[in-house]
Image (tube, coloured by chain):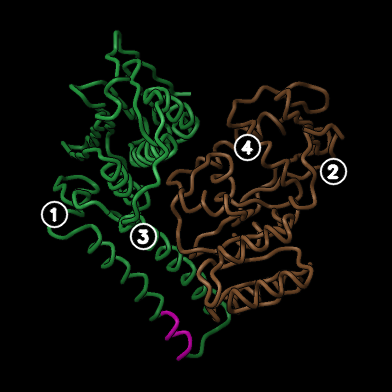
Amino acid sequence: MSGAAFQVASPGATGALTKSRSPLAHLLHALNQPLTGLQCSLELALAGRRRPEEHVRTLREGLDLTERMRVLVEAIRELTDTQPDAVAEEIFKFDELLRDTVDNLRPVAAALGVRLVLVSSLPLSVKADRRSMAALIFRLLESALALTRTGSDLQIVVAPELEQIHLVVSWKQGATPQHSPFSRPELALLIAQAGFERAGGEWNHTLEGTMQSCTVRLPLTSALPHFTFADQPCTSGDSK
Amino acid sequence: MRILIAEDDEALSRFVRQGLEGEHYTVDVFPDGEQARTAATQFEYDVVILDLNLPKLDGVSVLRHLRAKKPSLPVLVLTQRTRVEDRVQCLDTGADDYLAKPFSFSELSARIRALVRRSHLPSESVLIAGDLKLDRVQRMVERAGSRIDLTTKEFSLLEYLLLNAGRRVTRSMIIEHVWNLTFDTTTNVVDVYINYLRRKIDDGHSAKLIHTVRGVGYELSGPSELQASGIRI
């Protein structure tokens, strides 16, 4: 985990986790809840006489709590991963990778009733670990998609800014997800933040009214010779 | 079907053993790498489930030994690590599949079935299930003689289902193999793509090929067993 990963004090889903304590402390605290629930549930099941259907219910609840703990443990593990990445750097077009991911998520967006709008400047060549970057972009966009209000747009804008790639993902907040602020999409955003920061990027997450926005700035120091400014922005939207 | 489990966590190996025996596998458990290596070398197993952090001899050494002695023996590695790099390193060392702890038993069970099937299947260029045909070289799909146009992702998904025809595959397995991602997704991306595929593959046909396995994932199975055309890649 990079030192900078949890220093962003911003409002919003992940921002709510960063006000007074580190997200890690919040997650560990959140882990206590299902753990306590499971322990109490099992103790009560052993202590009292119960009908078979009550035992079945206890087991189902136990399974749900265990799954909840698994999600939290997984998030903690990803956030505390301090091993250096085995980077396999290559030069690739960031905008193409972004477009592929957006296209890949269009059917999901359509099923959720969300319109994906991509505004992309071409071409934006970058030198990085392509596979890791693909996973990070997928995670960011998929989480944002899951948090977007049905019937609204998820807007993705990528453009060059000085010597950086400037990626802005913004959406109108949907219904508060179950287990918020530790819901799966919110945790995934947090992990994406840590991932981008680990990759040397800057992350900012803002909330204005009902609009949420994640901004990622990726340093292109190593890729500067391959960096080309866009001639014309290209916009694509699809509500398929 | 005989399975070797190399796992030093007694409780975990006991649960896994009970579960697999419940599915009619014969299971041998070894708590350290040395015993596991000896047993796997001396006896015939259909699958090895190998924890990486073993006492006396670590899992990677056991795996290297097995790859040298029994290259076709399917090995599923269990580990605490989930990073892509770890997974790649594991597969590069010779593991056939990889499962991070904590895992659900149904996930482990599905992966074992897929491994067993894969080890008995030759690589074929044309995969057939009932009247559905997928040509991996021409990248063409037909059902009952009619051509079906699929997107790249839909094609990969159908190919993966066909390679595991008759066996259930979990959403995690699909995400890993088709999307090349090693984390839980936050949307129902797999279900959405399965629905798209269903519309193209099953709509208008009385025999449905893609089935939902409640609580697990999906299974593609036709009226007849998966057949291969005989054309080798």
Q: Amino acid at mark 3?
A: Arg
Callout 3 and callout 4 share a chain: no
Callout 4 and callout 2 share a chain: yes
Chain letter of mark 4 equals B
Please report the residue visible at 81 percent of the width from the left and 34 percent of the height from the top. B232
Please report the residue visible at 13 percent of the width from the left and 48 percent of the height from the top. A9
**Predominant secondary structure in magenta?**
helix
Observer-side mark, 2 or 3, equals: 3
User: In the structure shown, which secondary structural element does the residue marked by tag 1 occupy?
Assistant: loop
The chain coloured green carries which letter? A
Observer-side mark, 4 or 2, equals: 4
Q: Is residue A37 above or below residue B187?
A: below
Q: Is residue A177 above or below residue B56?
A: above
Q: Amino acid at mark 2?
A: Pro
Report the Cα–Cα distance between label 4 and label 2.
20 Å
Q: Label 3, on which residue?
A: A77
Residue A174 % position (x, y): 31, 40
Residue A177's disc number? none
Q: Label 4, on which residue?
A: B157
Quadrant position of the C terminus of chain B in the picture: top right
Residue B164 % position (x, y): 72, 47
Give the magenta range. A41-47
